[in-house]
Image (cartoon, rainbow, N blue to C red):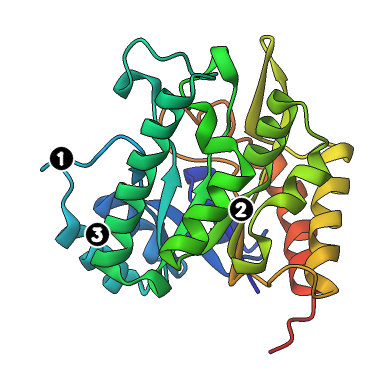
Amino acid sequence: MKFALNYSPQAAELIRFGQIPLDYYKCPDWPDLIDAASVQLPVYVHFDLKVGAGFDDAVDWAAIERLAAQTQTPYINHHIAPLAKHFPNVPPDVTDRAAAERIFHQIMRDAELIAAKFGPERVIAENAPYYAGDGDIMRPAALPEVINYVVEKTGCGFLLDISHARISARTLGIDERDYLSMLPVHRLRELHVTGLRLVDGQLRDHLALTDEDWAMFEWVLDRIRHGQWAAPWVVAFEYGGVGPIFEWRSDPAVIAGQVPRLYDLVHAVPVFP
């Protein structure tokens, strides 16, 4: 397994002085940022495709293919993330069966379209965080049976975001480890880890890891180590980034303090063919 970190100017400075070990930068699908990051390290691209709302002509499928080829990104990821704004008059915590089925069918149409465009073996589906009435992700997206169906029906792989899963589990009232085990971890291809805590009254991710987060991450790695879950090709620490959304979550002290431990944990897991 490889270890990656979100690209950030702070991470780049630490790399420049040899202060952190990394295999890859994880970058959004921004060509200029990819070019800048690639000067230092190999890059793989995390695409901003969301299934569940339908795609319009604004999606440049050829550009996605070009960026994947340029960086040798092995998988085209999408997020199972139907948004409330695309389903007027339907609350995020939808319980109406007809409305929930409409959302589910849109998820499947979009997921099958992506699988057809790139080939299911190149596609991975990521779980999104569900906050019920406090968020914009619709409830069907967080149900383990829906996530499993998307993966099995389309033949794609699974991108597990641990913090997203923990948020959804708490919202749905399911034990976090039970919820994680209900997901299609037998098709795990990529893994994301971040810290999770309350910020201004809301559970937020993309933060430094606390003792609780470290314990959860080591539990996940233990499942992989013992062959209970598939081994992903890469584990990404989604801390730090570029722009206002990340400027308060790009502390170089956090990066320097936590990346070496994460790197060592990931590289200590034996991966068997």
Task: State the CA–CA distance, disc 1 to disc 3.
Answer: 15 Å
Task: State the CA–CA distance, disc 2 to disc 1.
Answer: 26 Å
**Amino acid type, mark 1:** Asp
The spot of residue 212 in percent (x, y) is 87, 38
| Image quadrant in which the C terminus is located | bottom right
Q: Residues within 10 Å of mark 1 (few under 14, many from 20)?
A: few
Q: Which mark lies nearer to you, 1 or 3?
A: 1
Which residue is label 2 attached to? 160
The spot of residue 216 in percent (x, y) is 83, 47
* Left or right placement of residue 109 versus residue 151 in this view: left
The front one of 107 and 268 is 107
Which residue is label 1 attached to? 56
* Left or right placement of residue 66 versus residue 76 in this view: left
Q: Is residue 182 above or below residue 1?
A: above
For this orientation, the residue located farthest to the left is: 57
**Amino acid type, mark 3:** Ile
Q: Residue at x 15, y 62 (%)?
A: 62
> Of marks 1 and 3, which one's residue comes earlier in the chain?
1
Task: State the CA–CA distance, disc 2 to disc 3.
Answer: 21 Å
Can you see residue 35? no
The spot of residue 262 in percent (x, y) is 75, 58
> Of marks 2 and 3, which one's residue comes earlier in the chain?
3
* Left or right placement of residue 156 versus residue 232 in this view: left
| Image quadrant in which the N terminus is located | bottom right
Q: Secondary structure at mark 1?
A: loop
The front one of 69 and 159 is 159
> Of marks 2 and 1, which one's residue comes earlier in the chain?
1
Q: Residue at x 30, y 34 (%)?
A: 53
Q: Residue at x 38, y 65 (%)?
A: 38
**Amino acid type, mark 2:** Leu
Which residue is label 3 attached to? 64
